[in-house]
Image (cartoon, grey):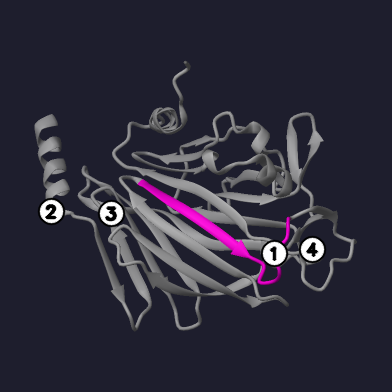
Amino acid sequence: MVRWYLGVRLGLMLFVLLSATLSTGAQSISLSNAHAKVDIAVDSNGVLTEIHSVWSVLFLQWIPQVQYQGPKVIIPNSQQPLTYTWSIVPLNRTDAVQLIGKESGGTGSSVAIRNITLDHNSIEISHMLQPGDSVRAIQKHRANVKADNSSRLLTSIDDWYTYLPPQVDYVYSPAMKVVAGDVVPHWAFKSPVVLFQTTFTAASIVPELNSFTKQSILSAPMFLDLANDGVSPSAFSYGVGNIALTFHSLYSRTPSVALVWNSSVAMNYTVLLWADQEPLRAYQNISQWLWQTYAKREK
């Protein structure tokens, strides 16, 4: 069994090479290697569809794991997120692509720039949202404070991913949630991961900790979020926005407090996918990945 597994794995490494294909008419692209695949499509209306899949050696097929929902950009006094019209920008690389989204719902001209890079079983995301106006430092203000003509108020930005397997057998989050508005604040990023596992596959989202600075935390606090109520499809996200302590160690979104959106907001994170896992044991892989990525030897 072990020899068969290794033989198939080596075969995949040799014959399933990094590949990217672009269909100019359909505005679609697919990035893949021997471990992960990202299928991206933009329809005639500029609506983005993005599916992240993992390769299973046991089943010899791609298994879809998460679907990207697009940036959920909320502005004060609105429950509906801004909408964007997307286009694909090939980078002449087999492992990366850039997506450009122009605001199509709202009163502004914000632009979303989304860079995707494939590396082994990790999908690295660098997502920057530009307000489209003059650039100054982001400062905290209450939503009822009037901004000047070159600024907009912003409540929060999230990148949400729907978990595609029909059930979730195991969930890890570094902090508790009680109600839908609760989030996992950056103060709880001791193990900065939201992980879903079902049977033999798993998916997780991890912030890029090396991108944090004191200024970025103060101006646009980061948080993780998840939804897993057993009724609606499970999902996880990474985002920025103002949050507040509501009870003991519970933190919630604060829609009444906004950011003045005068400069770019960056969200850097990684989506990791696994297949052929032991049931309820995927946390071991993500723990190992965190140590390999962020641990530093003490002098």
Q: Nearer the viewer, mark 1 or mark 3?
A: 1
- Determine the CA span between mark 1 and mark 4: 20 Å
At horizontal 40% and vertical 33% (from top left) the residue drawn is 289
**Mark 4 and mark 2 residues within 8 Å of each other at the beta carbon:** no
Residue 203 can be seen, yes or no: yes
x and y percent of residue 182 in the render?
Answer: 71, 43
x and y percent of residue 133 in the render?
Answer: 70, 71
Q: Nearer the viewer, mark 1 or mark 2?
A: 1
Q: Note whether 89 is above or below 118 in the view shown.
A: below
Q: Note whether 171 is above or below 49 in the view shown.
A: above
Identify residue for label 1. Answer: 135
**Counting residues from the N terminus, which is met first, the one under dot 3 or under dot 2?**
2
**Please, what secondary structure does the residue beneath circle 3 have?**
strand
Q: Is residue 244 left or right of residue 272?
A: right
x and y percent of residue 8 in the render?
Answer: 12, 43
Identify residue for label 2. Answer: 15
Identify residue for label 4. Answer: 76
- Determine the CA span between mark 4 and mark 2: 51 Å
Q: Quadrant of the N terminus?
A: top left
Q: Quadrant of residue 134?
A: bottom right
Magenta residue span: 122-137
Q: Residues within 10 Å of mark 1 (few under 14, many from 20)?
A: some
**Please, what secondary structure does the residue beneath circle 1 have?**
loop
Q: Three-letter amino acid code at disc 3?
A: Trp
Q: Three-letter amino acid code at disc 4?
A: Pro
Residue 1 can be seen, yes or no: no
Q: Is residue 104 left or right of residue 59?
A: right
Q: Three-letter amino acid code at disc 1?
A: Val
**Counting residues from the N terminus, which is met first, the one under dot 1 or under dot 3?**
3
- Determine the CA span between mark 1 and mark 3: 43 Å
Is 46 in front, or is 135? Answer: 135
